[in-house]
Amino acid sequence: MMSIKDNLLEVKDLRVSFQTYAGEVQAVRGVSFSLKKGEVLAIVGESGCGKSVTAQTLMRLIPTPPSYIKSGSILFDGKMDITKLSNKQMEKIRGSEIGMIFQDPMTSLNPTMKVGDQITEGLIKHEGLRKKAAMEKAIEILKLVGINSPEGRIHQYPHELSGGMRQRVMIAIALACSPKLLIADEPTTALDVTIQAQIIDLMKTISEKTDSSIILITHDLGVVADMARRVVVMYAGKIVEQGTVDEIFYDPQHPYTWGLLRSVPRLDTNSNDELVPIPGTPPDLFAPPKGCAFAARCPYAMNHCLEEDPEHTTLSETHSSACWLLHPDAPKVERPVGVGGHQHV
Ligand code: SF4
């Protein structure tokens, strides 16, 4: 059994806000989760739920101002609190200890630099390799990410490659210095379905072949089922449910998770269930609601939900959910058809 020492990352009560002319936007409101070494964790939720802000805060990529870490800690590799590091210390960690794969390779790759130079940059800077040795390693990494004829590709510019290949190059750059943690923010959103499946397969292989832990940020639960071991579901800047993939897919407990599961197709089943979008929009994080943030969209909302935000109920060692329906005095409701099993909650 793994102990807390095996955690690569421990995020505790993280709060991140943006200061704007109109006031404070509370983008992340007390998020806590951990990640074990070699584990693939998915953070899911609609856009604006705080998942990308959380991911970028782990790498301290969000400009300050307007953003600022209000409170909380991000303990990395048992020894450093990322929230407390200087920009210079962070520069060393980015790329060498933590790598990031962005959504759109076209905007994150440098269009004026050859592919090989972009991969070797980190190897030369962080690992002190000489140009020739770095190029040899770049070719090896391009092979690992499934690029044919890498000896020729290293001399090409990003615009000479297809979308899927550019994404592979970005993964290669992120992997170059063998980071302990790889953060992939919607890595397949900009790709067509066939290439999406190939990139997911590639990331699965990487997580198996290397020791890197992966945090996958996505709105697409299909991707999650295929790749991750654990899932964190975020809504309005908070975690509303977390559990293993099986717990989230077969025994989900939060009405928002039910909504998400009904609203996206799954890649791992041939289910013909009709897709049902979640009605309404998330709350304004200038002034988050007093009670449960999902109440305005939740078909099961009770008066108490409007008054008090639910705490997390522990359902197993790995599974917890923040919903008043889990209170012993709450009425029993049935999960919607097609979501998990059909037990009462
Ligand atoms: Fe719905 Fe209430 Fe649960 Fe929030 S706490 S998800 S409003 S039932």
Image: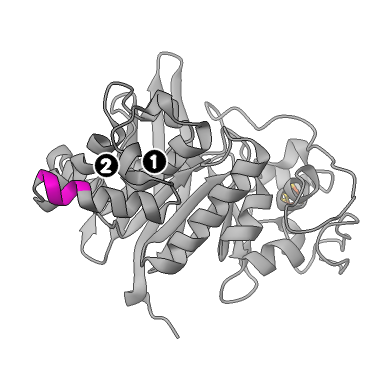
The scheme the figure's colours follow is one colour
Residue plotted at (88% across, 54% down): 336
Q: Is residue 247 above or below residue 96?
A: below
* Residue nearest the viewer, comparing 48 with 299: 48
Indicate the quadrant containing the C terminus: top left, top right, bottom left or bottom right: bottom right
Q: Amino acid at mark 1?
A: Val
Q: What label does residue 119 carry, if any? A: 2
Horizontal placement of 283 versus 298: left or right?
A: left
What residue did someone put label 1 on? 169
Horizontal placement of 242 versus 60: left or right?
A: right
Question: Would you say the beta carbon of the disc 2 residue lies within 8 angstroms of ligand 1?
Answer: no
Range of the magenta residues?
131-135
User: Disc 2 versus disc 1: distance between alpha carbons?
Assistant: 8 Å
Residue plotted at (56% across, 66% down): 229
Q: Is residue 328 above or below residue 93?
A: below
* Residue nearest the viewer, comparing 106 with 156: 156
